[in-house]
Amino acid sequence: MSDAVNFFDRQFRDQIAAGEFILNPFEEAALPHLRGEVLDLGCGLGNLVLAAARAGCRVTAFDGSAAAIERLSAAAEAEGLAVVGRQADLGHDPIVGSYDSVVAIGLLMFFPRPLSTELLDGIQRATRPGGVVAANVLIEGTSYLDLFGGGTYTLFGRDELAQAFAGWEFLQSSHESFDAPGGTKKNFATVIARKPA
């Protein structure tokens, strides 16, 4: 298990124990745009997955954290939701199938540059014509790096994510900055875009 997966597995176990299951701002922004068959890569505790399934979507969700997938699967089963959750190494397991909506919130930066680019290409290929991608990444200027655990990572250029979606219809393209522990910062780029039909 990578250092980053260990970091989040511990964080998710703490959140489960505390009963912290709210959508983060990026998930809140993505939810209204999700429809049909949804793929969530790096789903974490599955808060967005469950909300999308409650809204009628059929969701396939992957995460590297066993704790996250266990929680998601139990919650989906208890509510009878159309969710398939699976633990996966997203750096090695290829994206299979096509989807109406693909989510990659806080995922792509956890891989070295060539792999993060390959994953983004795979996300775009897996999105059906007229489908939507909701993605966000940490960008240059981010000083909170503890979550990478000394492993490889990619801080994207400020507009790099948006540029990767040239030719798509932008439903949202934004930059956000958040305070982080130790006086550090987390700077994000977020894109929600519709693939040409």
Image (cartoon, rainbow, N blue to C red):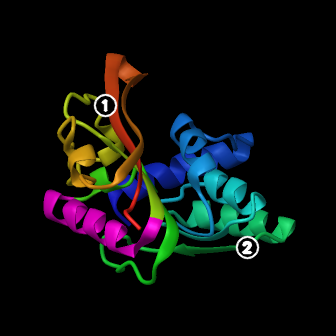
> Label 1: which residue?
144
Which residue is found at the position 50% from the left and 73% from the top? 99
Question: Which quadrant holds the C terminus?
Answer: bottom left
- Residue 127 belongs to magenta span: yes
Q: Where is the N terminus found, in terms of image quarters?
A: bottom left
Chain part drawn in magenta: 112-130
Name the one closer to the observer, 5 or 176: 176
Q: Can see residue 40?
A: no
Amino acid under disc 2: Ala
Q: Position of residue 139 (x, y in %)?
A: 25, 37
Residue at the far top: name it.
183
Residue 148, given in percent of the width and then of the height, sits at: 30, 47
Crowd tier of the residue under label 1, counting other residues whose Cα lies within 10 Å: few below 14, some 14–19, many 20 or above = some
Label 1 secondary element: loop
**Residue 4 tag number:** none
Rendered residue at 80%/71% (across/down): 77
Q: Which mark is residue 82?
A: 2
Identified at 52% across, 50% down, the residue is: 10
Few, some or many C-alpha atoms within 10 Å of disc 2 (few <14, some 14-19, many ≥20)?
some
Q: Amino acid at mark 1?
A: Tyr
Q: Is residue 136 magenta?
A: no
